[in-house]
C-alpha cells in the first residue's frame, strides 16, 4: 500500500512510500531513510498520525492504527542523535578522570602545594573511582537500553551536570585546608558506601536478567534470592535507593557540604524518575504489589 509522508512543520508533502499491510512504524522509518530522506536515519525520525500528535512507537503496526492505502503520516526531524550507551560512557568517564586529576592537587587549582592529600581524601578518591568505574563497566556489560538514542544536544547538559559537580566536590575534599572527620565517620561511611554499591550492582544485574536480549519485555521485578534484592519488597526502584545511599555515606565519610548537595540533588532527580516508573508499573501490571513505594521505603 502507498503512504504519503508530510512534514510536521507546515504539513509540507515530502513524498510517498510503499509498505506492506502488516508493516510497523519502524518499517516506515526505514523506507523514509532509504527513499525520501537518506540523511535522516530511523533514530532521528518521529512518526505521527497528526502534525501535533504523539510520536508512534516503533513496534506499532499500521493496521492497528487503521492506516491504510492512501493514508498520511507526519514526519518530525528529531535532530542529530547519540546512542544512550555512548551518553552514559561520556557522563561517567568525565567524573572519573576529573576527580583523579584534582586529587593530584594541580597548581592551576591550588597553587604551589607539595603535600599529598590525607587518608580521608585518599579513601574518598578510591570510593569515587570505584563508583564511576563500576558505572562504566555496567554500561558496557550490564545495561540494556529500552531507547536507542537521545538528542545529541542533551549530551552537553548531562555531562556538564556530572563533570562540574565532580570538580566542585573534588576541589573541597582535596583542598590543603580540608579538615578530615573522625575515624567513626570514616569507618561508617566506607562500610555504608560499600554495601550500597554492591546493592546497586545487584539490582542492575537483576533488571538485566528480567529482559531477554534484543527484546523490550517488561516484567514485575521481584527479589531473586540475593539479599540486596529484598529491597524490592519495599520500593519499585531500589537501584535509585542504593544510589542515594552511596552518596549519603560518601557525605558521612567526608563531611563535605558539596557532597551532601550532590546527594540531595541526585535524590530529587531520581525521585522524579522513580515516581514515573512506579506509576507506569502500577498502570501496566494490575497485580503489582500495593505496598511498594517509589524510592524511599514507607516514605516516597
Image (spheres, rainbow, N blue to C red):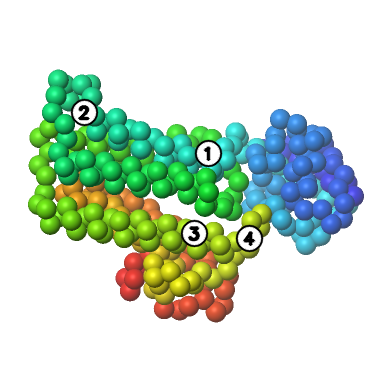
Of mark 4 and mark 3, the one earlier in the sequence is 3
Q: Which mark is residue 86?
A: 1
Of mark 3 and mark 1, the one earlier in the sequence is 1
Q: Is residue 83 left or right of residue 107?
A: right
Residue corresponding to mark 4: 212
> Distance from label 3 to label 1 (Cα)?
20 Å
Q: Tell me where residue 35 appears, x and y as whole percent.
A: 82, 34
Pointers 2 and 4 in contact (C-beta within 8 Å): no
> Distance from label 3 to label 2 (Cα)?
36 Å
> Distance from label 4 to label 3 (Cα)?
12 Å
Q: Nearer the viewer, residue 194 or 86?
A: 194
Badge 1 element: helix
> Distance from label 1 to label 4 (Cα)?
21 Å
- In the figure, 111 relative to 8: above or below? above
Q: Tell me where residue 229 appears, x and y as whole percent.
A: 42, 68
Residue beneath the point at 43% across and 69% down: 226
Of mark 1 and mark 2, the one earlier in the sequence is 1
Q: In this view, does 122 lie to the left or right of 12?
A: left
Pointers 4 and 3 in contact (C-beta within 8 Å): no
Residue corresponding to mark 3: 205
- Give neighbour class at mark 1: few <14, some 14-19, many 20+ (Cα, 10 Å): some
Residue corresponding to mark 2: 105
Amino acid at each position: 500500500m502507498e503512504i504519503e509522508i508530510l512534514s510536521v512543520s507546515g504539513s509540507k508533502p515530502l513524498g510517498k512510500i510503499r509498505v506492506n499491510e502488516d508493516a510497523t512504524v519502524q518499517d516506515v522509518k526505514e523506507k523514509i531513510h532509504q527513499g525520501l530522506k537518506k540523511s535522516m536515519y530511523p533514530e532521528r525520525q518521529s512518526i505521527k498520525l497528526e502534525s501535533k500528535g504523539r510520536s508512534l512507537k516503533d513496534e506499532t503496526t499500521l493496521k492497528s492504527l487503521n492506516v491504510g492505502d492512501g493514508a498520511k503520516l507526519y514526519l518530525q526531524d528529531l535532530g542529530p542523535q547519540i546512542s544512550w550507551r555512548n551518553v552514559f560512557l561520556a557522563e561517567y568517564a568525565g567524573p572519573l578522570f576529573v576527580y583523579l586529576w584534582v586529587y593530584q592537587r594541580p597548581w592551576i587549582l591550588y597553587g604551589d602545594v607539595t603535600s599529598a592529600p590525607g587518608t580521608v581524601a585518599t579513601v574518598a578518591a578510591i570510593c569515587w573511582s570505584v563508583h564511576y568505574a563500576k558505572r562504566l563497566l555496567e554500561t558496557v556489560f550490564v545495561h540494556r537500553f529500552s531507547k536507542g538514542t537521545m538528542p545529541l544536544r542533551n549530551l552537553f547538559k548531562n555531562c556538564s551536570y556530572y563533570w562540574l559537580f565532580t570538580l566542585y566536590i573534588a576541589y573541597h575534599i582535596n583542598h590543603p585546608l580540608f579538615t578530615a572527620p573522625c575515624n567513626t565517620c570514616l569507618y561508617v561511611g566506607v562500610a555504608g558506601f560499600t554495601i550500597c554499591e554492591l546493592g546497586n550492582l545487584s539490582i542492575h544485574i537483576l533488571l538485566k536478567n528480567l529482559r531477554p536480549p534484543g527484546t523490550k519485555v517488561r516484567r514485575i521485578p521481584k527479589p531473586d534470592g540475593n539479599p540486596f534484592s529484598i529491597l524490592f519488597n519495599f520500593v519499585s526502584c531500589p537501584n535509585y535507593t542504593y544510589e542515594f545511599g552511596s552518596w549519603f555515606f560518601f557525605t558521612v565519610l567526608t563531611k563535605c557540604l558539596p557532597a551532601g548537595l550532590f546527594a540531595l540533588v541526585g535524590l530529587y532527580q531520581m525521585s522524579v524518575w522513580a515516581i514515573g516508573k512506579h506509576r507506569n508499573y502500577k498502570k501496566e501490571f494490575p497485580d503489582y504489589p500495593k505496598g511498594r513505594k517509589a524510592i524511599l521505603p514507607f516514605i516516597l
